Image: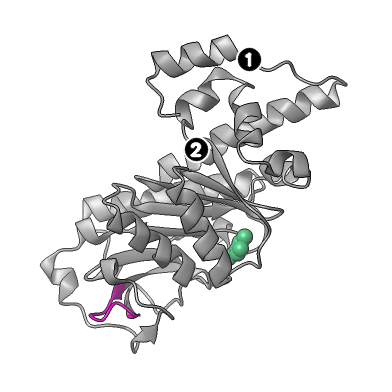
Amino acid sequence: MNITYTRPALQAEIEKVAEVAGYLWQKGWAERNGGNITINITAHIDEALQALPALTEPRPIGKKLPHLAGCWFYCKGTGRRMRDLARDPMANGSIIRILPGCDSYEIVADAPVAPTSELPSHLAVHDYLLAKGSPYRASLHTHPIELVALTHSPKWLQKDAATRMLWSMIPETRAFCPRGLGIVPYLMPSSVELAEATIRTLDEDYDVVMWEKHGVFAVETDILNAFDQVDVLNKAAQIYIAARSMGFEPEGMRDAQMEELKAAFKLPK
Ligand code: 2HA
Ligand code: ZN
């Protein structure tokens, strides 16, 4: 029995995961088992869930994350495909709870699907978000084609070079991704170094971080909003590439137009 069925708020969060997983697949951003989703669902955990026995023995996280005391997460399963999550998120992911001590977890529902190999990095990001009092509860890693393509040129790896170009392609980009695109130079996937660099870059006040020649990592209040930020940024990259394919360098919005937008939307940067 799927434990979310009788809990509309929790069910709604899981349905958002399925919806976004479908978009990632349709966009070609989620080949094979590419990408990850983790959601902090602690706010939706009731006493009956608290009392559920674990499906597995405690498993080590690999680090101590003190702000995750009492937290629960939905996590994509390791090796699972986004296109399968889209059909059945609870068969291709699982609900885990962090155990007292904050350095281990157990799988509680619906089936003992082992969480993503990126779990320590995702949990470290959630720990960081809670520590700073952020309302963000969703984290998304995916491989958006045009954004990844940009990172193959050193030009777009300079701090905020891609941000300024992307913002200037279409006004919505700055309005809806007001913190722009942080950059993390290439690091080994799943490494501690990559997790640490991601947190450092989020802390420089970005919601979306670009991993050179790999993909993006986005955080937001929920998974739909995390997806939207990446979608808006990637759309701007597509416009840039479309202009280049037509044989010219796009002009971009003028500085005065960008400043006008910043004032009108009261944007942070
Ligand atoms: O887990 O994309 O970088 C699948 C990935 C890891
Ligand atoms: Zn990846």
The residue under label 2 is: 229
Q: Depth check: give the residue in front, 139 or 11.
A: 139
**Callout 2 amino acid:** Gln
- Residue visible at 66% across and 55% down in the picture: 185
What main secondary structure does the magenta stretch of the protein show?
loop
From this view, report whether residue 210 is shown above or below residue 229.
Answer: below
Give coordinates of residue 72: x percent, y percent.
28, 67
Residue 1, quarter of picture: bottom left
Asked whether residue 45 is drawn in magenta, I would say no
Asked if the residue at tag 1 contacts the one at tag 2, i.e. Cβ–Cβ closer than 8 Å, the answer is no
Q: What's the magenta region?
A: 97-104
Examine the rendering and report whether any part of residue 164 can be seen: yes
Give coordinates of residue 21: x percent, y percent.
51, 52
The residue under label 1 is: 253
Residue 232, quarter of picture: top right
The quadrant in which the C terminus is found is: top left
Indicate the colouring scheme: one colour
Examine the rendering and report whether any part of residue 86 can be seen: no
Give coordinates of residue 183: x percent, y percent.
60, 47
**Callout 1 amino acid:** Met
Q: Residues within 10 Å of mark 2 (few under 14, many from 20)?
A: many
Question: What whole-number distance in Å separates the C-alpha atoms at marks 2 and 1?
Answer: 20 Å
